[in-house]
Amino acid sequence: MFRAAAVSIVLFLLAGCSTSLTSFTPAQTTPGGHVRVSAAVGVNTGAGDMVDRIDEGSARAEQFQTGQRTPTQMDAADFVDLAAALVVNPATVGSDLQLRVGILDAWDFGVRVSNGTLRGDTRIQFLGREACDDVFFGSIGVGFGAYAFGFDVPVPGAYEDFVTLEDIERYEFDGSLLFGWSGSVGDVWFGPKVVYTTYSTTAKVALSPVPTVTAQITGSNIYYGGQVGLALNLYIFRLAAELTIAGVSASAEANSSGSTSDQSTDGLVIYPAAGVMFEF
C-alpha cells in the first residue's frame, strides 16, 4: 500500500505535458530574508482543434481496445495527429510547487516544478514601499524553464497502449507584470503575462497489425493574456486561487516517413489554479 501511494504521488507531481501558465505569487516580492512556499493544482483547458483531436482519438482507441474496430494505416496517420495534439497544448491537470527567497526587500528569486518542468525566475518590485503591508504594489518578472524528466512517456488514457512520446524536450521563457494589494487580510494581484515555449519529441504509434509509425514533432507556442489572483490569510497559511486567460498561437509540424503535416492552431486557454501559500 505504501509503495502504491508513493507511486501515485510521483505520478501526480510529474503530471501534465502542457505549459503551466500560473504565476501564483502576489505583486509584492518576498521580503529580504524571508521565504515563500506554495503548492497549487492547475487545469489547462486546451485550445483550438487540439481538444477535438484528443476526444476523437480517445473514442477511436476505445474501439480498438474492445475489438469493435481494426486499425488501418489511415488510423496510424490520424494517431500521429493525436500525438501532436498531446504535445502542442493538451487539456491536462498539473501541479505547481514553488519556493521563493527574498534577496532584498524589492527583489526575490523563485524555483518551481510545474507540470514536469523545472523553472527559475526573478521578480523586481518597482512600485510600493518595501516590506510594508496594506499598500499597492507593482513588480515585473522573467523566467526560464526546461522539461526536467527525459524518460519515455506512455500517453495515459484510452490510447496508452498505442502512443508513446520519447526524448521529450521543452523550453519555456516567460514574462509578467503584476499589480495588486498585499496586507494582513491577504493579497490581490492582476496583470498581463506572456509565455513562449519550444518543444520537440519523437512519437511512436503502434497499432497492430499496422507497422509502427515514428514521427518527429517540433514546434513553438506563444501565450499572451492576463491573470488575476486572490489569497486569504488564515494565520498559518494563505488559501489562494488564480485565473489565467490567454490566447495561444501554436506553430508545429509532424514529420513521418518523409511526409510533413501541419499541426498549427490558434485558440483560447483558460487556466484556473488553486492552492496554499506559506511565508517564513
Image: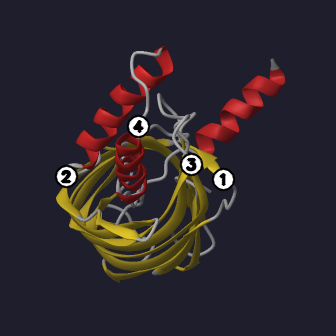
Q: Report the residue at 29% width, 62% height from top.
A: 263
Q: Which residue is mark 2?
A: 48
Q: Which residue is mark 4?
A: 72
262, 45: nearer the viewer: 262
Instruction: Identify the mark nearer the N-term, 1 or 3.
Output: 1
Distance Cα–Cα, label 4 vs label 2: 26 Å
Instruction: Identify the mark nearer the N-term, 2 or 1.
Output: 2
- The relative height of residue 81 versus residue 56 in the rendered view (above or below) is below
Instruction: Identify the mark nearer the N-term, 4 or 2.
Output: 2
98, 161: nearer the viewer: 161
- Identify the amino acid type marked 4: Thr
Q: Secondary structure at mark 1?
A: loop
Q: Report the residue at 39% width, 78% height from top.
A: 141
- Identify the amino acid type marked 3: Thr
Quadrant of the drawing holding the C terminus: bottom right
- Identify the amino acid type marked 1: Asp
Distance Cα–Cα, label 2 vs label 1: 26 Å
Mark 4–mark 1 CB contact (< 8 Å) = no
Mark 3–mark 4 CB contact (< 8 Å) = no
Instruction: Identify the mark nearer the N-term, 3 or 4.
Output: 4
Distance Cα–Cα, label 3 vs label 2: 28 Å
Q: Which residue is mark 1?
A: 152
Distance Cα–Cα, label 3 vs label 4: 11 Å
Distance Cα–Cα, label 1 vs label 3: 16 Å
Instruction: Identify the mark nearer the N-term, 3 or 2.
Output: 2
Q: Do we see residue 232 in this rendering?
A: no
Question: Tag on residue 271?
Answer: none
Q: Is residue 278 left or right of residue 189?
A: right
Q: Which residue is mark 3?
A: 212
Is the residue marked by circle 4 packed among few (<14), some (14-19), or many (20+) residues within 10 Å? some
Q: Secondary structure at mark 4?
A: loop
